[in-house]
Image (spheres, rainbow, N blue to C red):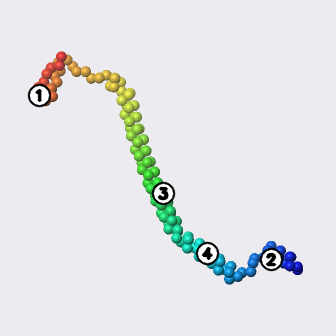
Amino acid sequence: MSDAISKQHDSAGTQPMPTWATYAEAMNRFSRSARAFMEHVHYLTEARSAYQEALSVGAELRNRLDAGDQTLKSLMDQLEQVLNVHMSEPGLDRKKPELVKGEQIRQEGTGTYRNLP
């Protein structure tokens, strides 16, 4: 094989020969990266904790909102029922009670009565 064919063969399919320098460089990169990651790993724990708290609080808020909605709906249903009952009663809402002539009313604070005209 010629030199040109040998170089093409080496670059096409084979990896470079491992050396101590390659090993040392890989170990140094690993060490730097691992240290940098370890310095910031507390953010992952913090993020996970905050995520769990947000899920828990969100679920509790949804439960409270749902309960509040049910209470409001129930109250509105009761109001509608009362309104329907009173609207269907003949004349009660339309006619105001009147005083009968000659009826006595007690005057506040005096303890006396007087006749109405």
Few, some or many residues within 10 Å of mark 1 (<14, 14–19, 20+): few
N-term-proximal mark, 4 vs 3: 4
The kind of residue tagged 3 is Leu
C-beta proximity under 8 Å, tags 2 and 1: no
The kind of residue tagged 1 is Thr
Relative to 64, 39 lies left or right: right
N-term-proximal mark, 3 vs 2: 2
Few, some or many residues within 10 Å of mark 2 (<14, 14–19, 20+): few
Q: Secondary structure at mark 4?
A: helix
Give the label, 4 or 3, closer to the camera.
4
Q: Quadrant of residue 110?
A: top left
N-term-proximal mark, 1 vs 4: 4
- Foreground: 45 or 86? 45
N-term-proximal mark, 1 vs 3: 3
Few, some or many residues within 10 Å of mark 3 (<14, 14–19, 20+): few
Q: Which residue is mark 3?
A: 55
Q: Which residue is mark 4?
A: 30
- Foreground: 50 or 21? 21
57 to 40, vertically: above or below: above
Q: CA distance from mark 4 to mark 2?
A: 27 Å
Q: Position of residue 1 (x, y in %)?
A: 88, 80
Quadrant containing the C terminus in the rendered view: top left
Q: Position of residue 93 (x, y in %)?
A: 33, 25
Q: Secondary structure at mark 1?
A: loop
100 to 61, vertically: above or below: above
Q: Quadrant of residue 95?
A: top left
Q: Which residue is mark 1?
A: 110
Number of the label disc, if any, that sits on residue 10? 2
66 to 107, vertically: above or below: below
